[in-house]
Image (cartoon, helix red, strand yellow):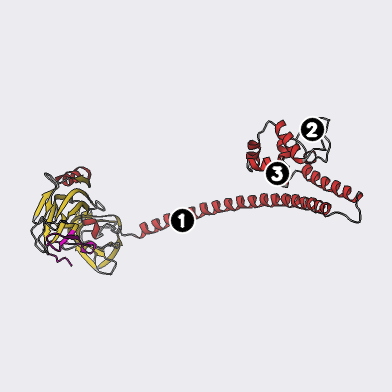
Amino acid sequence: MDEKSTLGLRIQECRRAAGLSQEALGQRLNVSRQAVSKWEADAAIPELENLIAMSRIFGVSIGRLLGVEPEQTETAGPAERPPEDGGLMEKELAAVEAIAAKYTEEAQRHQRPGWSRKRKAITCALAAAVVLAAVLLVKGQLEAIYRRLSSMEAQVYRVQTALDQQVSALSGELSNILEENSSIISDSQAAIIDFDPNAQTVTLLVSAVPKELTDTTTAVFTATLADGRQFTAVGERRSGCFASESLVVPMDDQTIRLSVALTDGGSTRIGAMEPLYDCHPDFFRLHVEANCSSSITENSNPWSEAPAHIDFGDLHVEIWLDAPVIRQALAPTAVDFCLYRNQEITPVWSTPVPEAVSDFQQNGYADISAVPPGEAPSYTPEPGETVVAALRVTDTMGTTTWTVLDVFRASSSRSISRLHWSNLEPWSPGTAIP
C-alpha cells in the first residue's frame, strides 16, 4: 500500500480489495453511500469509530489505513477477537497511541518557532483521538457491568414473584381449611328460579346440608343486600338438608350475601353460604339496538303543491342478553317496525320483523339487517305533526319496550326537519316530544 497516497485512496483500495461496493461498505458501517464516497474523494475524514471498523473489515491495521505504518510481509498470527463489550482491542488502542506518538515526535523534530496552526490542530486532534478511544473502552466496560446488574435484578424479581405466589397459595389453603373446620354446613347452593321485571325482584332456590342434624333442628335462610336490608325464608327439611324455593330478593347490582341459621334446643348458629353475584337488573331484560336508513324529500318548486314526505329504507337490529342467569328463557316473541304520530299510543303504520325473532331463537341473540316487506315505506306528515319511528319488542315475560330510530317534525307541508332524540330513552307511545 503506497504511503504517499491519500487516506481516501487507501480506503478505496482496501474496499475494492475486499470486494465491497460503496453502498455495501456504508451498510456495514451504518453510514450512507455518499459518506463513503466523500471519504474516498478526501472531501471528508471518517470518525475514529469508522476508521477502527474499516480496519477490522479490511483486515488491516489502523496505521496502514492512515499511511503511517508499512505493510507486514510476515504471516500474521491468529486474529484477536473483538471484546464482547464493544470496546477497543488492546492492539487497536496501542495502534492509536502509537500513531499519536509518531505524529507528535515528527512534529517536534521539525518544530520551528513559527509552528503552524495546522500542525497544532493535527496534534490536538490526535490527542483527542487517544482520549476518545480510552473513553470508548471505559464506556464498553461500564455497559457490560450494567447488563450484568440488570440480569441479576431480573433474577431476584423472578424469585420474589415465585415466593409471593407460594405464600398467597398457602394462605388461601389455610383460610379454606380454617373456614371448613369452623363452618356448620358441609355444602350449600343458590340459584335464581324466577324473576319479576315489573317488581324488580328475583326468586331464589337455596339449600344447605348441616354437619350436625337432629330431629328438632330448624333452618332459616337470609339474604343480605349491600345497603343492609335483609330478606328471609324458612327452610324445609329434605332428606338430610334444608331447602327453600320462596326466598324473594330485590334485583341488586351489588353482591348479595347469603347465610343459613340452624336452631336446635334453643341454640342458634349461623353459617355463611356462597354469595350471589348475578342479580344485576340488566341481566333480566333484553337489550336492543337498532337503526334505520331514512331520507326526507322536500318540495323546492314554488309552483308545485306536492307535499314533503319521509322514506324509510334498510333496518338493522341487534337483540341480546347480558348474562343467562335465569332458568326461565327470556327471548323476543314479536319485533315490529312502527311509526307513531304526535302523542298517539297506536302506531299509524307498522310492519313485523320476523327475522329478528327467528335469529334469536337459533343463536341466543339477534343480529340482522332487513328491508321492510313490500315497497319501501313512506309517510307524509301533516303540517305541525311530529312523527316517531321506533322498534317495538315484546318478550316472553309479556314486557314490551320501544327503541327510538328517528324523530321528525313537519314545520309546513313543504318542509320536514329531523329532531335530536338521544334524550328520549327510555320512550313509550304517548310520551310528549320536546
Residue 199 visible? The answer is: yes
Q: Describe residue 174's horizontal placement relative to residue 82 as left or right.
A: left
Return the disc, 2 or 1, that comes first in the chain's sequence. Answer: 2
- Would you say the magenta stretch is mainly helix, strand or loop? loop
- Badge nearest the viewer, 3 or 1: 3
Give the number of callouts: 3
Q: Between 403 and 376, which is closer to the camera in this rendering?
A: 376
Q: Position of residue 428 (x, y in %)?
A: 14, 61
Identify the image quadrant of residue 26.
Answer: top right
Q: Amino acid at mark 1?
A: Ser
Mark 1 — residue?
168
Q: Label 3 vs label 1: CA separation? A: 55 Å
Range of magenta residues: 407-434
Q: Secondary structure at mark 2?
A: loop
Q: Residues within 10 Å of mark 3 (few under 14, many from 20)?
A: some
Q: Residue at x 33, y 59 (%)?
A: 183
